[in-house]
Amino acid sequence: MKLFIYIFTTAVLLTHLSSCRDEINATGSYQHVPVIYGLLDQADTLHYMKINRGFVGPGNALEFSAIMDSNYFENMNAKVEELIGGNVIRSWDLRDTLLNNKDTNGVFYGPTHRLFYFSTANMDPLKEDATYRLTVNVDEGDLIVTGETRLVANFATSTNVSSPTAQMRFAKKPEEYQAQSLTFSKGTSVFANCRMNIKVTEYRGTIADTLFIPWNIFEGEAAGNTYSSAAQGQSFYQTIRNNLTNDNTITKRNLEGIEIIYTGGAIDFYNYLTVAKPSSSLSQNKPTYTNLTVTDGYQVIGLFSSRHEVRDYKPFVSSLSQSVRCIDANSTRELCQGTILGDYLFCSQHPQDVASGPSNKDYACQ
């Protein structure tokens, strides 16, 4: 089960509160300002949203921000509806929950914070052909916020490494690196991110510890109907080295597998991030973006949109087939004996490398 929470930063909120000419009339009467962030993903079974209130009025805003209850509506309910052909097919009332994972650095309350969610566990996932409508009702209809989004549809994994037996190639021969191309389908997304988690096990005698090394490959817009990126071989080995310690208590390291993670974002999500980028203007005046609508006389800040994450785990060793390995033999040799990682005690546990006789490799685990 995956969890995605879009949490606005202190800097963003302070920008909204201080840009009175653009956002909130500080000379007017006290007024609630809904602050709402939610991203749907059909790969999730729990769908979380942040629903807060911002406001101006008498008193010290920094004192208000440190009080948890002052950041939430006292009388609020929210729902998400699934529409196909204009008809409501399913509906979920949002429930609230408290999490204790918020950073306590900064002016806002923490570590406890409240999120609102609905669940699609034990039922069909969200549908790519549906429209999803969010309705937030405050003070029994005095203030209503609505927003709609479509899901990111037909977003697919890399066509050139998606086969279970496809092997990624980062080195041709010792110290001659090569780039592994990654091409994946755009679908209805307008921008995407591709990254890897490299799974490594470290041994101290018989004690094993597993770590996951993150590697960001690509983020940008599509060229035509696909995204194309290149995972550079030298960067692959250097990224692993940069995340390891040269610990003399470690007796062996093994590559266990590589998870490739593709994430595509919808148009409203892209527009929001584009507008929210730091301003290069000396005046620091910035436009604002939201796809939410609110009752006349009120203002709203935030976003209701979608993204879709697809994961493809490629093991180094598979019990199903000896032909499965996430990186090929040349890349494995470079991992174990190359100039970048040769002194980090990697060895290969792959059956093709540890075979008896002439097939045994000198970089195989003993």
Image (cartoon, rainbow, N blue to C red):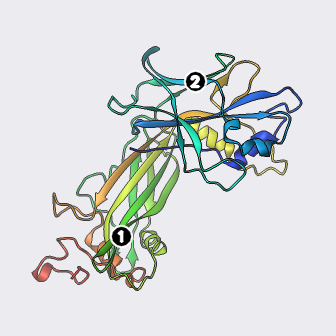
Q: Residue at x 81, y 43 (%)?
A: 285
The part of the image, by quadrant, that contains residue 324 is: bottom left
The amino acid pointed to by label 1 is Asp
Q: Height in image: 75 above or below 235? A: above
> Mark 2 Cα within 10 Å, few/some/many (few <14, many 20+)?
some
Q: Residue at x 84, y 30 (%)?
A: 25
In terms of depth relative to the viewer, which is nearer, 36 or 189? 36
Spatial CA distance of label 2 from label 1 is: 45 Å
- The reply to whether residue 68 is in sight is yes
Side of 42 relative to 193 (left or right) = left
Q: Height in image: 350 above or below 60? A: below
Side of 323 relative to 220 (left or right) = left
Residue 4, x across and y down, in percent: 49, 44
Q: Secondary structure at mark 2?
A: strand
For this orientation, the residue located farthest to the top is 87
Q: Earlier in the sequence, mark 2 or mark 1?
A: 2
For this orientation, the residue located farthest to the right is 27
- What residue does disc 1 label? 209
In terms of depth relative to the viewer, which is nearer, 211 or 356? 211
The amino acid pointed to by label 2 is Asn
> Mark 1 Cα within 10 Å, few/some/many (few <14, many 20+)?
few
Q: Are marks 2 and 1 in contact (CB under 8 Å)?
A: no
Q: Which mark is residue 77?
A: 2
Side of 32 relative to 239 (left or right) = right
Residue 210, x across and y down, in percent: 36, 67
Image quadrant where one finds the N terminus: top left
- The reply to whether residue 41 is in sight is no
Image quadrant where one finds the C terminus: bottom left
The part of the image, by quadrant, that contains residue 28 is: top right
Q: Secondary structure at mark 1?
A: strand
Side of 353 relative to 167 (left or right) = left
Residue 357, x across and y down, in percent: 10, 82
